[in-house]
Each structure stands twice: as structure tokens, then as C-alpha cells.
Amino acid sequence: MSIYEFNVKTIEGKNISLSRYKGKVLLIVNVASNCGFTPQYKGLESLYEEYSGEGFMVLGFPSNQFLSQEPDSNEKIKFFCQATYDVKFDMFAKIDVNGEDADPLYKFLKEQQGGVLWMDSIKWNFTKFLVDREGNVIKRYGSSTKPQEIKADIEKLLQ
């Protein structure tokens, strides 16, 4: 099983298959607009701009599960991201990343790359999953890992 078997909803509300990203290196991130890590949007956009021509994509999934730091509608989230951080990478509809109602994609990501001390739950906003060109989940990074710290791992997968 790979991530290509999942369907997700874009931030505009359109259902798509992740198979559209076949052959790309992906960084999948749960994001929030009112978090101490929100400035990471700038670094994520920088990675996207630097490597998108080589087959790299960032996929942002807003979630309101951490101290209600993403309370707004998808429309307001999209506006915030574009107006504040000039985000051009793909954004998706707000989802749950933990619990019974967790999006199936996030259940899969957590199964593939568990968290610290074998605890699979997402601990906070801006947890990142790196996916290779074949749809395999290669690595998981915590919230405090800055996007620029992932460059070497991205570059290896792009070769």
C-alpha cells in the first residue's frame, strides 16, 4: 500500500486522488495558522520553490486539534496562507490527524512512521512526513524540525 491509494479534499473542496503525485517526492505537513510554528510556512514555501522543478511537492493539511490553533474555515485558511506567507504549494481541507475521526491518510502515515517512544499520535502542528517517488513514507519529523533542516533528505530522494 502507498499514499497513492488515498483520496483527499483540496482546500477548495474538490476531491482528488493522491495518485496525481506519483513520481514526486512529497513533504506532507499538518499545519495551523495560530501556532508558534506557523512561521514555518515560509520555510516550507522556500523548499517548494527551490525543488518543485525537480519533482518535489509540499502538501499542507490544516488541523484544529491542537489548542484550537486552526479555527477558521478553509476559505479563510487559504487566504491567510497566501496573504501572509505567499503559499503556492498545495493546501487541503481541514482534517483531524488524531483520534477516531483521523483522516485515513494520516492513519496510514502514522502506521508507516510512528512517533517518539512508539507513540503514533501526532504531537503538534507542523509534524512532517517525507515520502519518496514511489509513495513510501520514508521519515517523520517533529514540529521543531525546521523545513531547511530537511533539505539534505529531500535532495537524496530527488537524485
Image (cartoon, rainbow, N blue to C red):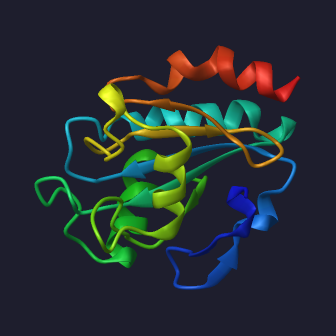
The picture places residue 117, in percent across and down from the top left corner, at: 31, 26
- Name the image quarter holding residue 45: top right
Q: Is residue 154 above or below residue 83?
A: above
**Residue 67 placement (x, y as % from top left):** 10, 54
The residue most toward the left is 67
- Residue 85: x %, y % from top left: 43, 46
- Residue that extends furthest to the front in the rendered view of this protein: 118
Residue found 45% across the figure and 73% down from its top:
93
Using the image, determine if residue 88 lies above or below residue 143: below
Residue drawn 23% across and 61% down?
A: 70
Q: Position of residue 65 (x, y in %)?
A: 21, 60
Q: Please, is residue 21 above or below residue 29 in the view?
A: below
Quarter of the figure with the N terminus: bottom right
Q: Residue at x 26, y 41 (%)?
A: 123
Residue 113, above or below 146 = below
| Residue shown at the point (33%, 27%) measured from the top left | 116
Residue 140 relative to residue 48: left or right: left
Q: How many marks?
A: 0
Inspect this view and state whether residue 55 appears.
yes
Q: Quadrant of the C terminus?
A: top right
Query: Could you say which is closer to the camera, residue 159 or residue 13?
Result: 159
Would you identify the image quadrant in which residue 95 lies? Answer: bottom left
- Residue 87 can be seen, yes or no: no
